[in-house]
Amino acid sequence: MILCDTNVIIESFKGNDIAIAELKSIGIRNIALSAVTVMELYYGAYNKRELSRIKRDIHSIAILQINVDISGKAISLIERYSKSHNLQIPDAIIAATCLIYGIKIHTYNRRDFEYISGLKLFLP
């Protein structure tokens, strides 16, 4: 399973052929989203019509919910990296989700995650 960052999903929605090909190569059954990514996608919708389209497009993707383990790991990541690397709360939760589940992250913003110890990046 590969956790896809918000930017990868947005690029696929925009019709980016590379993003679409990468997601197809991973396979819908092997893609997961953090609950944070879902929130970001919904929040970024321009209107209710686009929100409905987003919901339809991600309905068959596994959503990994925030739980006690993920929250605890995210707190540790914020403590360790927020001052030295400006780690933001959403990215900490996304990274913590990957670390807790032992899965790689697929992102186009590698600099937001590459310094996190133990986090594995998906490199298509």
Image: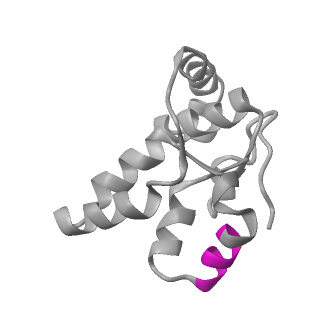
Location of residue 25 (image quadrant)? bottom right
Q: Position of residue 75 (x, y in %)?
A: 56, 20
Q: Position of residue 56 (x, y in %)?
A: 37, 62
User: For the point 63% across and 60% down, which residue is it?
Assistant: 28
Nearer to me, 50 or 120 = 50
Q: Position of residue 81 (x, y in %)?
A: 64, 31
Can I make out residue 100 in this image?
Answer: yes
User: For the point 58% across and 25% down, which residue is it?
Assistant: 74
Residue 68 lies, with reference to residue 102, above or below; the image says above
Residue 37 lies, with reference to residue 23, above or below; the image says above
Does residue 79 appear to the left or right of 105 in the view shown? left
Q: Is residue 114 magenta?
A: no
Residue interval drawn in magenta: 17-23
User: For the point 52% across and 73% down, which residue is it?
Assistant: 11
Is the image coloured rainbow, by chain, by secondary structure, or in one colour? one colour
Nearer to me, 92 or 19 = 19
Residue 21 lies, with reference to residue 49, above or below; the image says below
